[in-house]
Image (tube, rainbow, N blue to C red):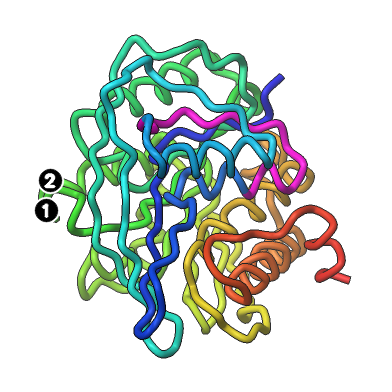
Amino acid sequence: MTHFLVVGESVADIVRTPGRPDVPHPGGSPANVAYGLARLGHDTALLTQLGDDPMGALIRAHLLAAGVRLLDDGQRDVRTPTAVVSLDGDGKASYAFDIAWTLRRPLPPVGDPRHVHLGSVAAVAQPGADAVLALVEHLRAEAGPQAGGGVTVSYDPNVRPALMGGHAAALPRVERCVAVSDVVKASDEDLAWLYPDEPEAAIVSRWLGSGPSLVLVTRGASGAAAFTASHTVTSPAGRAVVVDTVGAGDSFMAAGLHALRTLAPDRTALAALGPDALSELLRQATTAAALTVSRAGANPPDAAGLRAALG
């Protein structure tokens, strides 16, 4: 059985630093999450789109080396998406994209995953976003009415304004993804773009009321927070000498899902998460993110590296 099915874009991140040659790295938020989960020892499949080109070959080799199984919709005339990642003097990343997301039905068989993760461009960019949401809604419907049974779903909006078709078009799609999810992770920057000038607490409360049992908010160097209907737990950021921030949020997401496989493996357990479990979840996720920012590119820890860092 596939533990995790991740659906979304794979992107070649071309890292550009002043005074240095461009360096390509495999990336894309969903692909990074799939890679991180596989590195942490989970049976993981990624439904994505890759071109028959050098950047596609780079990403395929990277994902396959970690044990990720690759699925696609059979299209052969696609090109591999790219993002020029410009780093400032503090290693903070900004992005310029060349991405098309054209996933279409019929989709390949995806097996019987225990958990589905979706996010970023693939969840909102047309024409592919409709196929993504239809797949998630189908898998959730197959679970039946049992609160604790069936597939669970996570979502990270990972906002990229240049690719989301404008705020008015993007917001309803983001909220639809939130509503079909059990776990939602967003950065403070995501929330500021989606809901300008609205307090974080109000946004989280509304999201929790729309479907998810757990909302995670990352705050960069200020750490992270976990929210349920009954509890709020915060954590400082893990200590690190920052090389760059590429993939930090995706590493946080993968490690958070990794922790939840033990702490809350089904919908009933997610709804019952207490403060101790939330603290442990944040400890693992922030530690993984700290390890990732301490090295170049989206390079998350494997299971042994995470265990060693956690002590």
Left or right: 95, with 73 as reference point = left
Q: Secondary structure at mark 2?
A: helix
Which residue occupies the foreground of this view, 131 or 199?
Answer: 131
Which residue occupies the foreground of this view, 154 or 248?
Answer: 248
Asked if marks 1 and 2 touch (Cβ < 8 Å), the reply is yes
Which residue occupies the foreground of this view, 183 or 23?
Answer: 23
Left or right: 246, with 269 as reference point = left
Q: Amino acid at mark 2?
A: Ala
The quarter of the displayed image where residue 187 is located: bottom left
Disc 1 packing (10 Å; few <14; some 14–19; many ≥20):
few
Circle number at residue 166: 1
Q: Magenta segment: does it hold 47?
A: yes
Label 1 to label 2: alpha-carbon separation? 6 Å
Residue drawn at the location 35% of the way across and 39% of the way down: 177
**Picture quarter with the C terminus:** bottom right
Q: Secondary structure at mark 1?
A: loop
Residue drawn at the location 41% of the way across and 44% of the way down: 55
Residue drawn at the location 34% of the way across and 9% of the way down: 106
Which residue is denoted by mark 2 in the rendering? 169
- Across and down, in percent, residue 49 comes to 38, 31
Left or right: 156, with 86 as reference point = right
Q: Magenta segment: does it hold 126?
A: no
- Across and down, in percent, residue 199 comes to 32, 73
Residue furthest to the bottom in view is 89
Number of numbered markers: 2
Instruction: Give the residues in magenta.
Output: 36-51
Q: Amino acid at mark 1?
A: Gly
Which residue occupies the foreground of this view, 60 or 8?
Answer: 60
Residue drawn at the location 29% of the way across and 45% of the way down: 175
Q: Is residue 140 above or below residue 62?
A: above
- Across and down, in percent, residue 308 comes to 86, 67
